[in-house]
Image: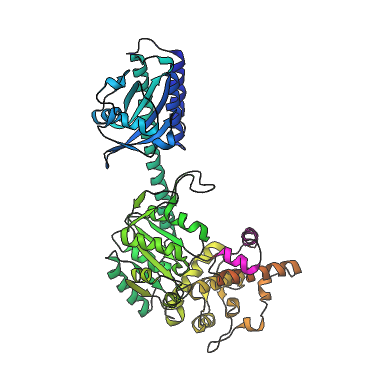
Amino acid sequence: MLSKIDAQKFNTLIEINTLINSNYTDVHALLTRIIESATRLCEGEASSLLLVDRETGELHFDVILGSNSTEAKQYTIKLGEGLPGWVAAHNKSIMANDVESDRRYDRTFSKKIGHATKSMMAVPMRIKDECIGVIELSNKKNGKVFTQDDLEWLEIFANQAAMTIQNAKSFEKVRDKIETLQEHLKASDGYHPFIAKSPVILEKIAIIDRIASTDSSVLILGESGVGKEIFAEQIHLRSARNHKPFVRVNCAAIPEGLLESEFFGHVKGAFTNAIQNRRGRFEMADGGTIFLDEIGDLPLALQVKLLRVIQQKTFEKVGSDVSVTVDVRILAATNRDIERLVEEGQFRSDLYYRLNVLPMFIPPLRQRVEDIPELASFFLKNAIKKTKRDLKGFSDEAMKSLLSYSWPGNIRELQNCVERACVIGKGKWIEPEDLFLDSSPGRSGSPAASDPFHTRDIGGDRSLKNAINVFKGQYIHKVLEENKWNQTEAAKSLDIQRTYLSRLIKELEITLDKA
């Protein structure tokens, strides 16, 4: 027991306890604060905090004060080696005021870092009676010797450090769980109903059931807007991984400079504004499925790292050299001619073959017209709920128009068409003139052909300002579709700043399609 309570040390203890219970954002800074306090109050010249790595059987330096920290952090100490190693191996404290006479002392390390050690205290940091690290102080100032009180105070500070690490681990575990649950909740809320009646799609369902039972990579091919993401969802939902996260990544929508961090995460300080550690999408998807949409737009530099994840199931976060292992099934999709990209050297052939283990082609909507009435009715029901319109459905002529149109934009275009008709239609039934379908060769035309500027969309407000806003909205919508809803690329096409484009999207209420 302490011979007496030192007021300064006691107040410092209270101060640190307050910090431990309030701040987990920077664990290293908090541990440094604890070691600084222990060193100052026990009058040590130098100190360090070492953490135990049970896998390697070594201790590595986490905090070093008062000596050559850069040099020291390059070294590790084996369990049982030197005074710190002995403390970690035996889970007991040591006080040696003449280290040269202690047979457990290893002078070679002091020579390596150029630090002459005369006296030392070393105490274990414990969590549930297990040593997780060691705090050591060397050379009491002014030639003094360490006392039993010094050792007991250092043990108290070691308990605080252990508590800090335990709380930080618990906090990180809870935070990671919350992130995973949030991602899973978003995914769960985002699952699309699967609507199909055509024989060709019903055949795909049978294939999905067989594919879902494996963990092989799947490459989903098809035009833009055919619903590739919906098929990826079905593969996940019908697999043994369906209780784990389904994480979506649109490779074309994320700036190239951020893709690696988005995929694999980063550590604090890896780059400007990296103020804390961040998990990437692959780590969030651990145990589940990751869906890489627009894989054909993935930069070559990142293709190499993705190939490694597929082959070895490991990666390093940005700014770290520590490998992270994950168990993730990869589903990828693209609307581009990926074989041509391989021939042109824009896509790695080895990655293509790894992804193309189980290829699946989704036919365009014009090749499965049996699905059009089902999909149109579904979109109309949702639109009626949003707009609170009292509509009975499509007239026979409107349905004929839907069935005869070629749908170059596929399901996405059908959804937009139905939602627009629900807003501007005036009667109880959706009529052909409400659909504004462009005429196409071999397909029936519509009133849109005689109204190329879509003046019907202007509504009752015939002012020039409103007409310009209507045109702006439709034109920006078209450019976004052409750029696969990648705002960065669309802004380049429009020759405006991306931030300005984002503001226009909000002001003009342009809906970004996700079908």
Tell me, yes or no, whether the highlighted magenta stretch contains residue 175. Answer: no
Residue drawn at x 26%, y 34% is: 79
Q: Is residue 440 left or right of residue 162?
A: right
Q: Residue 356, percent across and down?
A: 35, 71
Q: Which residues are magenta?
A: 484-507
Residue drawn at x 35%, y 73% is: 359
- Looking at the image, which residue sits at the far right? 464
User: So how many labels did they put on this image?
Assistant: 0
Q: Residue 514, percent across and down?
A: 49, 65
Q: Is residue 169 depicted above or below 389 in this figure?
A: above
Q: Nearer the viewer, residue 30 or 430?
A: 30
Residue 213 falls in image quadrant: bottom left
Q: Is residue 51 depicted above or below 9 in this figure?
A: below
Tell me, yes or no, whether the highlighted magenta stretch contains residue 496. Answer: yes
Q: Nearer the viewer, residue 321 or 9?
A: 321
Q: Residue 145, percent across and down?
A: 37, 15
Q: Is residue 236 left or right of residue 31?
A: left
- Name the quarter where the N terminus is drawn: top left
